[in-house]
Amino acid sequence: MSGFFSNLLFFIVAISVLVAIHEYGHYIVGRWCGMKVLRFSIGFGKPLVTWTGRGEDRTEYCISAVPLGGYVRFLDSREADISPEDQGRAFDQRPVPARIAVLLAGPGFNFLFAIAAYWAIFASGVPTMLPTVGNVAPDSYADTAGLEFGDRILAVGDRETADWETALVAILDGVSGDGRVPLQIQRASGTQRALTIDVGEDASHLTEPGMIFSGLGFEPWRPPAIIGDIVTDGAASRSELATGDRIVAVAGTAVQSSADLVAAVSARPGERVTIGYVRGEQQRSTEVEIDSVEVDGATIGRIGVQLDNDFGDVFYLRKFGPLDAFAEASQKTWDTMAFTLRMLGRMVTGDVSIKNISGPINIAQFAGDSAERGLNEFLTFLALVSISLGVLNLLPVPVLDGGQIVYQTVELLKGSPMSERAQIIGQQFGILALVLLMSFAVYNDISRILG
């Protein structure tokens, strides 16, 4: 249950921060445009904490019972009579361009927050893994295209790929576009060549969550299980294993990475097993009785080795100066916005699986997992959700900022507001669309939990 409460806590923190930023955008730009703000609330429902601001407006600030949203309430002549001293300060009494600016400010501040978060990440330094190919499945799309173990992906299409995240986004873009992924790769020998992965009509299936690598038939390179040192009195010290050996099997189970070794050994405490390894060019094996250790109340296996982690040709620290970090953060935010819009459009056309729509359960799990991995991971999570929140709010759905911008634009063009009936119908349509979207998102979350 501790995992559940941890996920819930970080989910609430994330939503509260991002909603506060979004609503503050509406609030401060509304103030700048001469509008009177009646209430600024973080959360919905009954106010739990309330205080009144200074100044002539006496804005009411509150933290409300349901921490899954928030709102800014402007003075509006359509909702109540306006006192003589407040004439001209109601939302609907201000010029249309001012109203549009207020509506744009919420998503705009979400994008600004993403830039700030990415700036902090890039300025502090990001441990980065070059996009290097691991195992390639026989007769897969990747194998047919000619991809091999150890290939480094230099570019996908015309986009250079300095890390796996950039490469993965570009690969998804190609798969969900025309089903073709043009790659510029560098072999382990140093030679370069161009090749193309073509998935044909299988694009939508491959864009389902967790399907891209297994569907294409390759996986990212992972550090091999090479022994860097042997612990005194550990199981390995009582065997023929030595520093520099690469472990390739445990009890008949193939070991392709350090993670595979940890999993295989941890599951066999106290067992005597055959460990296969490679020394130089020779394949060898040795018998090892795995030690049993207690960790957090559970008994797991250990063989007493420290694995080599010197892979400087694959891993590096990506760090930027303040100005370069800002430029990189701005570009990252723009690219993520554009990618989000493309994916949404392709979901509508059926080119991308709608199983990618996530609800609060899945987002909460991501919030908890990213927070456990450290500040940079949590900031990355916040930046991605902030961008998604900004993009979704700009969609032309009447109950969202984008829909309200459409209303204001129509009024600007025709010189008068849309009819009340048209606005009500639009609001009803928008509410129905959001309810259906949220229902489907929750259905996806539950489906993932149930497998």
Image (cartoon, helix red, strand yellow):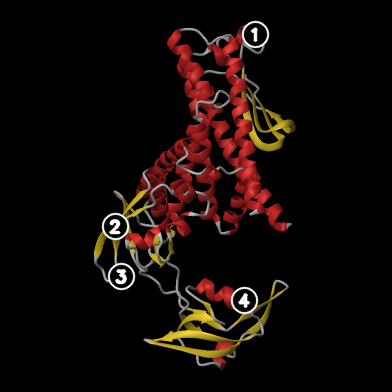
Does dot 2 land on a helix, a strand or a loop?
strand
The residue lying toward the viewer, choosing from 209 and 72, is: 209
Q: In this rendering, which labeled residue sits more in front, label 4 or label 2?
A: 2
Q: Are marks 1 and 3 in contact (CB under 8 Å)?
A: no
Q: Which residue is mark 1?
A: 83
In percent of width and height, residue 266 lies at: 62, 76
Disc number placed over residue 195 in the picture, else none? 2
Q: In this rendering, which labeled residue sits more in front, label 1 or label 3?
A: 3
Q: Amino acid at mark 2?
A: Leu
Query: Is residue 158 in view?
Result: yes
Disc number placed over residue 188 in the picture, else none? 3
Q: Is residue 300 left or right of residue 380?
A: right
Q: Amino acid at mark 3?
A: Ala
* Disc 1/disc 3 C-alpha distance (Å): 76 Å
Q: Are marks 1 and 4 in contact (CB under 8 Å)?
A: no
Give the residue displayed 71% in from the left and 34% down from the top: 64
Q: For residue 196, what is the image quadrant?
A: bottom left
Mark 1: give few (<14), some (14-19) or many (20+) Cα within 10 Å.
Answer: few
Q: Earlier in the sequence, mark 2 or mark 1?
A: 1
Q: Are marks 2 and 1 in contact (CB under 8 Å)?
A: no
Q: Which residue is mark 4?
A: 266
The residue lying toward the viewer, choosing from 435 and 232, is: 435
Give the residue displayed 44% in from the left and 49% down from the top: 202
The residue lying toward the viewer, choosing from 235 and 139, is: 139
* Disc 4/disc 2 C-alpha distance (Å): 40 Å
Q: In this rendering, which labeled residue sits more in front, label 1 or label 4?
A: 4
Does dot 3 land on a helix, a strand or a loop?
loop
